Amino acid sequence: MPTYEEARSCILDAIKPLGVEKVEILESLGRVLAEDIFAPWDMPLWNNTAMDGYAVRAEDCSAPVSLKISGFLPAGENMTSSIEPGTAVKILTGAPIPPGADAVVPVEETEESADSVSIKVPVKVGDHIRFKGEDVKTGELIIPAGTVIRPYEISMLASFGKLFVPVYRKVRVAILSTGDELVEPGEALSPGKIVNSNALTVAAAVRQLGGEPVMLGIARDDKESLRKKLTEGLNADVLITSAGISAGDRDLVRAVLNELGVKLVFWKIDIKPGRPTAFSLRDGKPVFSLPGNPVSTMITFEEFVRPALLKMMGHAKVIKPFITATLKTAVKKKPGRVNFLRVGLERQDGEYVAWSPGDQNTGILKTMLLAGGIAVLPSGQGNLDAGEKIDVHLLGPGVEMLEEL
Ligand code: AMP
Ligand code: MG
């Protein structure tokens, strides 16, 4: 049985990034750039003024001086004639520096009269000019392949008119719930039935990291139903099933996957909860069989599936870093295997403090909602006292880092 680390490495070793597609620029947000992007031209494209003021020849301004205003140049316009010596051109931020001018005097440092301007400050060549190419030079690598696109990368791409962006494909994830007891959310519950919440849980988690869920619904605990749904699921990039993976009489997922030519890589990981997790491959296509208890499904997704999906979408950084937190409450643990502990989290004086928000049984969903993170307690670890340090993976998009109003 692989350990926590072994299972994760084994999965990541087996997984390759998906192909590349060109998408409309805004669709590239959050995606991974698949090619280096080079600047097709200089930015800025011409010398221009960083301030509202007067374009001058610095040599005309050696002493406090009054210059005739010889023109007006707002942003968006261009002047082709040279500035006359001894004159100033009124200029607005962003406008190209007129030929012959070599400095800008900010309007705040001048006094304007009818048709002249007096300058009271010393002026140097280059003052308040944004120079051609000072930000980016033609041919310069502006965004390397592998970058995760943020609004700032969008800005750079937009500035160069790159309206279609090569990115790694979104992973299409087929999601299948299995179980005779399941009814879909909103359907009538009769005795013995429970709601299929796992499918939406996994779909939400897939979407949160930028993937595309494909809902397969429910397969019953019989081979025919499973065969039909699993076959359909193998059309996606990844197949995730929940439940039917333990050692019960009706746990048939592994057997049917095997019949369909899906090769088991491992079944069971030395962890708690989530031990019956299985990972298999068909021609390189990954199949994750997660345990059915909702909390086990959530935690095994977080710890094993998430990094895999990120890798498929071209991400180089796929493993969440641990943050260190100090336990506020004692926690019971038997040495033997890695335990995942749902923890409440808070920042106090710049440091994380963690506590168990209640019952850690996998049947208890409520404590998952109270958790800001999952503590990963090492296999050798025994009981923990308040005050001990633990390693925690933050859950969610990181809002825990924000300060309250
Ligand atoms: P199993 O692995 O099939 O023995 O299921 C383990 C537990 O998870 C049982 O209590 C199931 O009722 C529950 N369970 C299985 N599938 C789902 C699901 N899709 N949504 C919510 N709970 C589920
Ligand atoms: Mg079952």
Image (cartoon, grey):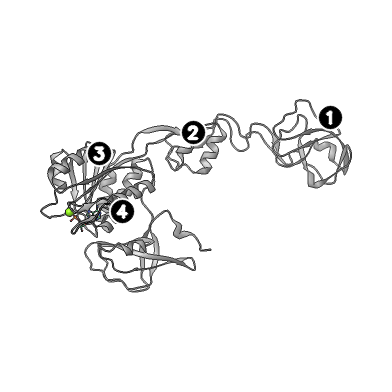
Q: Are marks 2 and 4 in contact (CB under 8 Å)?
A: no
Residue 46 in the figure: left or right of residue 150: right
Circle 1 crowding by C-alpha within 10 Å: few under 14, some 14–19, many from 20: some
Residue that appears at 13% across and 46% down: 222
Whether the residue carrying mark 4 lies under 8 Å from ligand 1 is answered with: no
Q: Which residue is mark 2?
A: 37
Query: In the image as oriented, which residue stretches furthest toward the left?
Result: 249
Q: Residues within 10 Å of mark 2 (few under 14, many from 20)?
A: some
- x, y percent for residue 337: 23, 62
Q: Earlier in the sequence, mark 2 or mark 4?
A: 2
Give the mark nearest the N terminus, 1 or 4: 1
Q: Nearer the viewer, residue 299 or 214?
A: 214
| Element marked by disc 4 | helix
Q: Nearer the viewer, mark 1 or mark 4?
A: 4
Three-letter amino acid code of the residue under disc 2: Ile
Query: Which residue type carries mark 1?
Result: Glu
Q: Relative to residue 133, is residue 192 drawn left or right?
A: left
Q: CA distance from mark 3 to mark 2?
A: 30 Å
Residue drawn at x 29%, y 45% as measured from the top left:
12
Return the disc, 1 or 2, that comes first in the chain's sequence. Answer: 2
Q: Quadrant of the N terminus?
A: bottom left
Q: Amino acid at mark 4?
A: Glu
In the foreground, 393 or 192: 192
Q: Which residue is mark 1?
A: 84
Tell me the distance, in whole angstroms, between the alpha carbons under discs 1 and 2: 42 Å
Q: Please tell me the numbered disc located at residue 285.
A: 3
Give how far across and how far down residue 111 sits, in percent.
85, 45
